Amino acid sequence: MLSYVSLEERVPQDHPLRTIRRITDRALERLSSRLGTLYVTFGRPSIPPEKLLRALLLQALYTIRSERPHRNRRDDEGRNVGLRRYMA
């Protein structure tokens, strides 16, 4: 059975990552001018620094030691919808 419910609807309003997302959004907004200088106009497209910083924060909060377990936890839709919404 397929689910057509958005991540926004599936994550409870009182989920702690919602608060963390608001805080990180404000911090990254203040850093956006500095982060903008990290982009280059040639070569392969890069991962936005904002997304990398969010991923590192989640790794620290959930004590995930490397990128692969982090990706596995994020992609496990049944348990961690909050992580997927936070990274979106």
Image (spheres, rainbow, N blue to C red):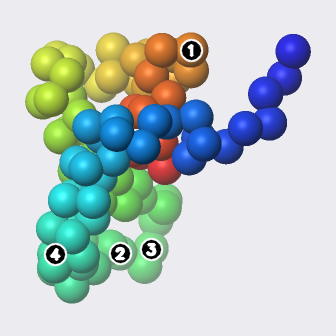
Residue drawn at point x = 25 percent, y = 50 percent: 19
Mark 3 and mark 2 residues within 8 Å of each other at the beta carbon = yes
| Amino acid under disc 4 | Leu
Say if 80 sits above or below 45 in the image.
above
Q: Nearer the viewer, residue 80 or 48?
A: 80
- Pointer 4 residue: 31
Q: Mark 1 points at which residue?
A: 78
Residue 52 % position (x, y): 28, 49
From mark 4 to mark 1, how far is it between C-alphas? 33 Å
Is tag 1's residue or tag 3's residue first in the polypeptide sequence?
3
SS for dot 3: loop
Q: Mark 2 points at which residue?
A: 40
In percent of the image, x 43 and y 79: which residue is there? Answer: 41
What separation in Å lies between label 4 and label 3 (alpha carbons)? 23 Å
| Spatial separation of the CA atoms under disc 3 and disc 2 | 6 Å
Where is residue 83 drawn, in percent x and y? Answer: 40, 33
Label 2: state its secondary structure.
loop
